[in-house]
Amino acid sequence: MAPSAAGAANRFGFGARPTDLRSIGSDPIGWLDQQLNGDAPGVGAVGLQSSSQVLMQVLQRKQSQRAATPGQPLQKLGQLYRPIYLAEAQARLRSAVESERPWIERLVHFWSNHFAVSADKLAVTGIAGAYEREAIRPHVLGSFTSMLLAVEQHPAMLLYLDNQRSIGPNSRAAALRLRRHSTAGRQPTRADINENLAREALELHTLGVGSGYTQTDVTTFAKVLTGWSVSGGPGDDLANAGRFEFRASWHEPGEKTVFGVRYRQDGLEQGLAVLHTLARHPATATHIATKLARHFVADEPPPGLVARLAHAFLDSDGDLPTVYRALLESEQTWSTEVGKFKTPTDYIVSAYRALQVTDGDERRSFATFELLGQRPWSPGSPAGWPDRTEDWDGAAALYKRVEWAAALAARLGSRRVAADLAPAVLGRRLSERTRLAIGRADSATQALTLLLASPDFMRRPA
């Protein structure tokens, strides 16, 4: 099947605006390819704070509260973080709705979900948005290696997976702790490693399940990553609070073997060397290729397409635009008839793009994502949000979408004409059944609801 403008806008972007299909015209691949040129666009909102600024602010408030009211409970972190979180979520939504390069915005969301953190963990709530802006967005048009290194050293990932306190059992810090406890007459306790970051880096971020790594690899890699922490603890220089810090005295010394490769580097360089190797491994190429093909093409991606993307990944040393272009240029990408079912985020953003509206109320906007089941940066696990139709098309979920569509249509009233919008945003994927239903609607509000609730709009058409 020949590439279509609707397929380009809906499969690769966040849905078409009323004038997009006309702008894309007869060259959908060219329209998408052009978006890969230059740096990824930033988030246009002003006043957003960096992760280090947020964490510094928290530390300063804790110190001032302790000084002012010693012995009293500190202000709850949730009260500090919530306004920051809502502002970040609103800025993210606006960027996706208003973007002239919607494929890049979708790629940002894809990689943010691949390297998932969760704002459900309080320590991450205030910096989840900054994490996406700092570790994902700048590298989405760069190399996989650069993104991987940025992610694994970001405070949000370290705090989410509890690596900030992982101490090698044979490190200098562990020995000092034992001596102090013995001197004080307390029962000696051994410092220990935390395996969360190592496990997820192997299982989710790089090699993937079934690639052949063992529990020994996880444990050894966890030792490699000891000392990877966040500045801002007792005795730290507050000028660097909230930033990645390698604590050399916490690092487990010695050579280590991870996934069959011996690493003789010392300290921070050891962890960086392991990540460089993992980023270039064939299993990582296949894992990334599979996830990209599943996200953009089909729940069960064609094996030939996966192989093509994996080859592009390896041949280019993980250059992501090269992999994206291989996806674009594959006939299998465009020959799949059934479009992907939209996630709640897809659905909300595509509706706003089609209607050319953005909800300016942060709390109501947040409530919409919560209602439809996909709060920003809040997946249930480090695996991120699921990416298959069966995870999103349950009866209760569909009913909530229809309710939301009806409420949105009621707010707009007759200011949007569904009969004109439908062909403009769906193109040749507008079915006769949906067109007739819209034409027979009793009111403009009902017609708009029927468009937004139609199977045509619920899917990302091919």
Image: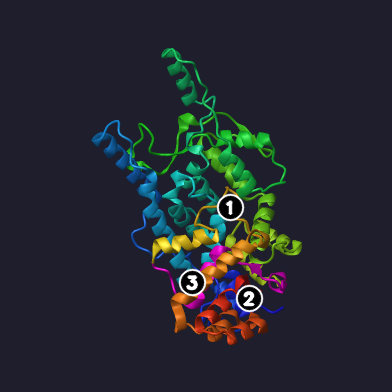
- Which amino acid does the dot numbered 2 rest on? Asp
Q: Secondary structure at mark 3?
A: helix
The number of numbered discs placed on residues in the rendered structure image is 3
Question: Which of the 4 image quadrants contains residue 213?
Answer: top right
Question: Which of the 4 image quadrants contains residue 330?
Answer: bottom right
Task: Give me the residue at 61% from left, 62% from top.
Answer: 396
Quarter placement of the N terminus: bottom right
CA gap, disc 3 and disc 1: 29 Å
* Mark 2 nearby-residue class (10 Å; few <14, some 14–19, many ≥20): some
- Which amino acid does the dot numbered 1 rest on? Gly
Judged by depth in the image, the label closer to the viewer, 3 or 1, is: 3
**Residue at the extreme right:** 303
Q: For mark 2, what is the residue?
A: 456
Residue 53 makes an appearance in the image: yes
Q: Looking at the picture, how far across and down is residue 218, in whole percent?
A: 63, 37
Magenta stretch in the rendered image:
332-360
Q: Looking at the picture, how far across and down is residue 50, in whole percent?
A: 38, 52
